[in-house]
Image (cartoon, grey):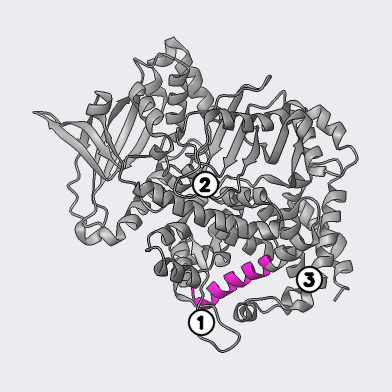
Amino acid sequence: MRETTQKIEFYNEFIEKVEKRAINEGSQQTAFLNEILTYMEQPDDPVIFYIPYKKTSKKIYLNAYLYDTDQNSLNLYVVDYSDQEIGDDIESTNMSSLLEVANRAKRFFTNAKFLIEEVLDGSYREVSDLAKTIIETKNDLEEVNIFVLTNKFYLSNKAIELSIPGVETTNVQVWDMDRIYQLSVAEQGIQDFYIDLEDKYNQSFEMMFVPNDSPVDSHYNFDCYIGFIPATLLAQLYEDWGPKLVERNVRSFLQARGGTNKGIRDTLKDPAQRQMFVAYNNGISSVARLGNIEKVDGVNLYRVKGLTGWQIVNGGQTTASIHQAYKNDIDLTDVYIQAKLTILKVEAHQEKDQHIIEDEMVSKISEYANTQNKINKSDLLANTRFMSDIEKFSRSTWVPTQDGRRAEEKWYFERARGQYMVDIGRRKRGKEQNDFKKQYPKEKVLTKVELAKYFMSWEGYPHISSKGGEEAFKKFMNYNSQYWKHEKDQLTSIQEMDNDFYKTLIARSIINHHITNIVEQMKLKGYKANVIYYTTAMFSHIYGENIDLIDVWKKQSVSAKWGSIIRTIASYTLNYLKESAGDRNVTQWAKQESCWTQFKEESTKQLSNIL
């Protein structure tokens, strides 16, 4: 009952944020999609349709897409949003309902030829771009991922099965409110759920203890075990516990994709190779808070009978592939997964730092153990000194007032996904929560990838921001490496970040919010994100010397005199992106440095004369 109450409180906070965002974005679905995307933290940002595409006669509906050339995959995003208020119980959904939502996106794919003819007049360029991409790549696509985003609770968490003719692999991922809630909780530390292997699964597994007799004092206090887990048991655990087991895995929400996972699938399908799986695969690395572990007499062997807060921090894709084979009735009797288990022990006096210590450990295990595929830098670098310093300044720096009253608000930097709403949930309902929200209003919440995109756009890298939050964050961290990273062959110490630097970071965000509001009021059709990034970069390129970032911080606004100039640049930007792209996909063109270089060369002189 307590968890249900917490979920309802979380839901209400989340939807309130969506509804406020929808006022500017003009659509509840688009606002909901954008909020969910901050939790997904994919390597690239999808192309979001300004108006969701709908063809009622063919039961087609789509909100966004992302074509990944590196992975040779296509992601389709479809939103199921209900504006019905919930009372004392959560609003749930079921497999058949979500399957129908997924089919709306599938029908877009299978009707691509029709859709090209439907939008030949060019009124819906994004739809035309996607339809052409499908036609041109459908014979080579390795994977189509359909993301169903719903503000209901999908409590059964059963897999949605769907196939597309001619496509080797079709995955359906459901992002429901329960998943968002669990992810938000998991971001704040390892959960305390207990898995009883003996009672529930009538199994246990044995591991060797790794001695740790080092005299060096460390704030990491842990026990480490190495061994193997039967594949069938791992599949059953994933079947029952689902995303809870891999919430801390930096690649946990990527489906089984790419060459690595294709190799896993092929090995498991072939009876002659199946027993070799333990030799071929790197296995899993996991952590837990506590373990019900007993020593086997006479040898360095320990029997794992139960685990509290067990998390697979490396090997999420291996786990997902094993589970898929299990679901497809592949015999896993003789398949074993090598495994490492770290029991992180937090002393009583360290409890207040528990989440920090766990985050550091999990981050390092993820970074050093992951060698097969690219991992998200935003996840691995969230615990750097630089990120922590920004967070500290955001909790201590008051927003200046303009009328002489005492300061009452601060910006809230969200270093971990869902951190803001979890912070609210930790306070008592009523006055405590209201005081917190008054001090940190929703409109002043800023995520790390948002901060990075705003920064890179203002500094003249709109093509980097257009590549998505992950790429922008990586470049942002490199750009500011003096605050967190020792460079090779240099003896200089890491530079201290001061309060003025923090204020200029927020000032760039204020400018971006100002430009975003203007662009949304203009109701320009198409490529809104790219228009905002390029407008911001061009505004900075031409007029940046006239903008005092500290002054923007002090006033918490941009002078009204820039409004007409920003509108002119924005309108000019959209026309440029469409015309210069020619027959190319506009979004892909906007990611190229040559797009930004050409824009500056062709437009700087003309746009410099509008002041």
Residue 428, percent from left and from top? 37, 63
User: Which kind of residue does numbered mark 2 sit on?
Assistant: Asn
Rendering coords of residue 181 (x, y %): 45, 48
**Residue at the spot x=25%, y=41% of the render?**
224
Q: Nearer the viewer, residue 426 or 242?
A: 426
Q: Mark 3 points at which residue?
A: 542
- Residue at 26%, 38% in the rendered image: 307
Give the residue drawn at x 51%, y 75%.
409
In the rendered structure, are the residues bearing label 1 and label 2 in contact, judged by CB atoms less than 8 Å apart?
no
Q: Is residue 387 above or below residue 294?
A: below
Residue 111 lies, with reference to residue 515, above or below; the image says above
Q: What residue type is labelled 3?
A: Ile
Q: Which residue ends up furthest to the left in the rendered image?
A: 298
Please tell me the numbered disc located at residue 376: 2
Where is mark 1, residue-wise?
Answer: 407
Q: Tag 2's secondary structure?
A: loop
Kind of residue at badge 1: Ala
Q: Which mark is residue 107?
A: none
Left or right relative to 273: residue 531 = right
Query: Which residue is outermost to the top?
Result: 272
Residue 19 falls left or right of residue 273? right
Query: Tag 2 or tag 3, which sits nearer the N-term?
Result: 2
Q: Which quadrant of the figure contains the C terminus? A: bottom right
**Most frequent secondary structure within the magenta stretch:** helix
Q: Which of marks 1 and 3 is nearer the N terminus?
A: 1
Residue extent of the magenta highlight: 494-513
